[in-house]
Structure formats: structure tokens, C-alpha cells
Amino acid sequence: MKKPAYKRVLLKLSGEALAGKQGTGINTTVLKQIAQDIAEAHKTGVEIGLVIGGGNIFRGVAASAEGMDRASSDYMGMLATVINSLAVQDALEKAGVPTRVQSAIAMAEIAEPYIRRRAIRHLEKGRLVIFGAGTGNPYFTTDTAASLRAMEINAEIIMKATKVDGIYDKDPMKNTDAKKFDQISYIEVLNKGLQVMDSTAISLCMDNKLPILTFDLTIPGNILKAVGGEKIGTLVQ
């Protein structure tokens, strides 16, 4: 078993990743594959905190653009992340990873309340902690929640797993001449307006010198490679 390059990481998954090719909802085959990949990485001994988006179920920003109250739509988005958290918890436990879900919005029957010291204790005991319901506040994305939780649990890096193999100067799906960056600074990301994470999350990471690694989640084994310190994706630092 290869040794991890980090002691503690925060893994950020987009909600869309759980939907697979169907675009919405939760694809159980994809879910099983992601859980298997995370389990392989967890076996190396790295402590993993996990934040999952809710875009496969509900997008607060999209709903508010259609005229819904922004705060209400954001709360609905937070509840969507809890649904995803429970699905991932179930898949991870079936893959043999002890998992706890902590929610920023109190739901005593299905998740622990988010308590920083308790989360750190779980990680130290080898449990994987999933942070649900974002920050618990409207107007903040799950990217910002991931940055915040990473700082709070003293993670060494944020690993943002997406459907693209890194950061490009323009959308690689639409432009064949898109150039990929192996490494890029926070300021460049902000100045170029690159859609890595939202500007609040990037600024938070920049102020606290927390590196961000973005890589392709759809390739089996990539999470293990990222945890092992192999050169994949794009590093923002």
C-alpha cells in the first residue's frame, strides 16, 4: 500500500458527479464507483473530510434566477447536499469505510450537528467525515463551505474532484485549443475569471495559503493518485 503524501485532506465533490450521464438525481453505479475510489484512498491512512454539492438535485442560484427568493432557494440547495451526503455515507460504509455525517443545519435524526472538535476527533479515529448543508447560511456556495471546513479541520489541501482533468484557460468542452495549466496562482485564477471555485472560496484559500488541487473524478483511481501526491490535474497555490 502506497503512503499518502498528506495527513489530512478535504475532498470536494460536485453534486453533478453523482448523477453520472443521466444529469440529475443519483446514479447508483457511479455512486458505488466513487465510494470504491474514496475507500482505496482512505486505506492509505490519510484522514478525509468530504463536502458534496447538491447540483444534481437542486440549484439555489438557478432557482433564484427564475424568480424564487434567494435565501429560500439556497436553503433548499443545502438540504439537497444532505441527501447526497446520506447516499455517499451509505455507499462508503458498504465499501468498509466508517463514516459520519455532520450537518450545519440541525437534523438530529439523520446527522450529527457540525461541531469542529468532534469532527477532528472522528478524523483522528480513522472515520471519514461528510460535512452536509454547506455553511448553514444562504448566499454561500458549497465551494466556500469546503474552503471553510478545510481550514477548520486543519486540512493540508483541498482536492476538488470534477468532470474535467484540471484548469484550462477556456472551456475545453467547447474549445479544442484550450490550454491546460499544471500549476497556477490564486491571483491568476481570480484575474482570469477561471471557473475553478467561486471567488469567495478562492480568496479564503489565498488568505490562508491553502492549496487547491483540481482533477478528473471520472477516471477510477484518480483520488488515490491525488492522495499519493502524484502529478495529476492542476494545482492552485
Image (cartoon, rainbow, N blue to C red):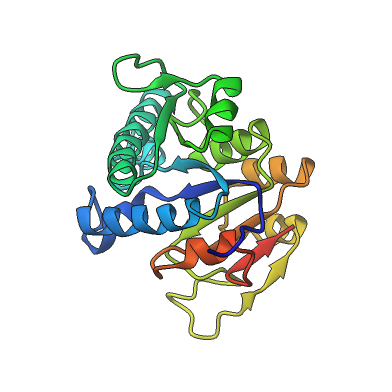
Query: Residue at 44% of width from left, 58% of height from top?
Result: 40
The residue positioned farthest toward the front in the image shown? 1
Residue 158 vs residue 39: left or right?
Answer: right
Query: Residue at 47% of width from left, 22% of height from top?
Result: 104
Measured as percent of width and height from the top left, residue 174 is found at: 43, 76
Whether 85 is drawn above or below 191: the answer is above
Measured as percent of width and height from the top left, residue 20 is found at: 27, 60
Measured as percent of width and height from the top left, residue 179 is found at: 61, 80
Residue 142 vs residue 230: left or right?
Answer: left
Whether 184 is drawn above or below 200: the answer is below
Query: Residue at 48% of width from left, 85% of height from top?
Result: 176
Residue 95 vs residue 12: left or right?
Answer: left
Q: Nearer the viewer, residue 213 or 128?
A: 128
Quarter of image, res 225: bottom right
Whether 128 is drawn above or below 197: the answer is above
Q: Quadrant of the C terminus?
A: bottom right
Quarter of image, res 113: top left
Quarter of image, res 194: bottom right
The residue positioned farthest toward the bottom in the image shown? 177
